Image: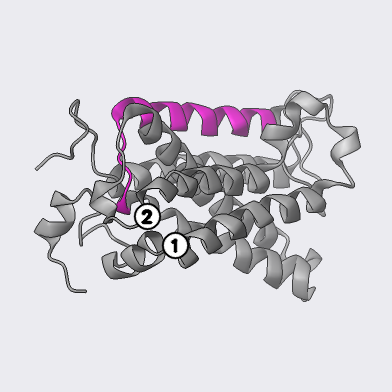
Amino acid sequence: MDESVGDERADGGATGRHAVVPRRWARYYLENAPSLVWLVFANVAGVFVGVFFYLETLPEVDTLAWPVYMDSPVATLLMALALATLLPNLGRRLDAAPANLVLAYLYTISFVWLVETGLWLALALNLHFGLYYPDVWRYFGVLVTHLLFIPEAYLLPHFGRTTPGALGLALALALGNDLVDYGFGLHPPLRYETGALFSAGGLTSSGIILAAGSVATSVVAVALAARAFPRLRPDGATPE
């Protein structure tokens, strides 16, 4: 289905200039019950697969800190929730999907968490490439699955909207997560030491590079969200 930029803007989707995922693909996967249910299921499954990856180290982490420790499961859980909001819209076009302030916050934070996690993982694995390569799963499997978070995130602007407040909160949460990760050493488990800013030894050289990179990926993720999403107007519509 060939849709013009004007049509995409009118029905609330990402414009052609910003649409990383083509509109016709987004409509196919998000308007059809089998594909939408499959996407929701895949993300829920991703939560459990992600948690399994953390099982060995979870006993060492305070239960209340699990949401900031398990980045990938949180990202896929947020995406599953975002996609599930489309289930009542099945049988209708994406432009008929509900739009309100709560959903704008959910979609924006989901986008940022997916993109930031995908970018961070690529940086973390390749910072000490030799410790992971050529392990098929621990390098290629983990890298590819996490990089797929990024195109998946770009499904969200096809039906979601954002606000300055949602973007600001997403940035605050992402940077706060970075502070916890490198201030207290609560980033996902790695095969090399990073130290912690508030520990006696401080950050290692790898930790400094990774912390700086993590802040950069957080800022980039929010900037991409700001560019990709249409803005929510008070009446729930998108700007002309």
Where on the picture, by quarter, is residue 62?
A: top right
Q: Quadrant of the C terminus?
A: top left
What residue is shown at x 35% (from left), y 61% (from top)? 31
Q: Which mark is residue 90?
A: 2
**Magenta highlight on residue 173:** yes
Q: Nearer the viewer, residue 64 or 140?
A: 64
Q: Quadrant of the N terminus?
A: bottom left
* Mark earlier in primary sequence (1, 2): 1
Amino acid on which disc 1 is placed: Ala
Spot occupied by residue 106 in the image (x, y as percentages of width and height): 45, 35
What residue is shown at x 68% (from left), y 56% (from top)? 45
Residue 85: in sight, yes or no?
Answer: yes
Query: Horizontal placement of 233 versus 78: left or right?
Result: left
Q: Which mark is residue 226?
A: none
Q: Magenta stretch: dominant SS?
A: helix
The span shown in magenta is 158-181
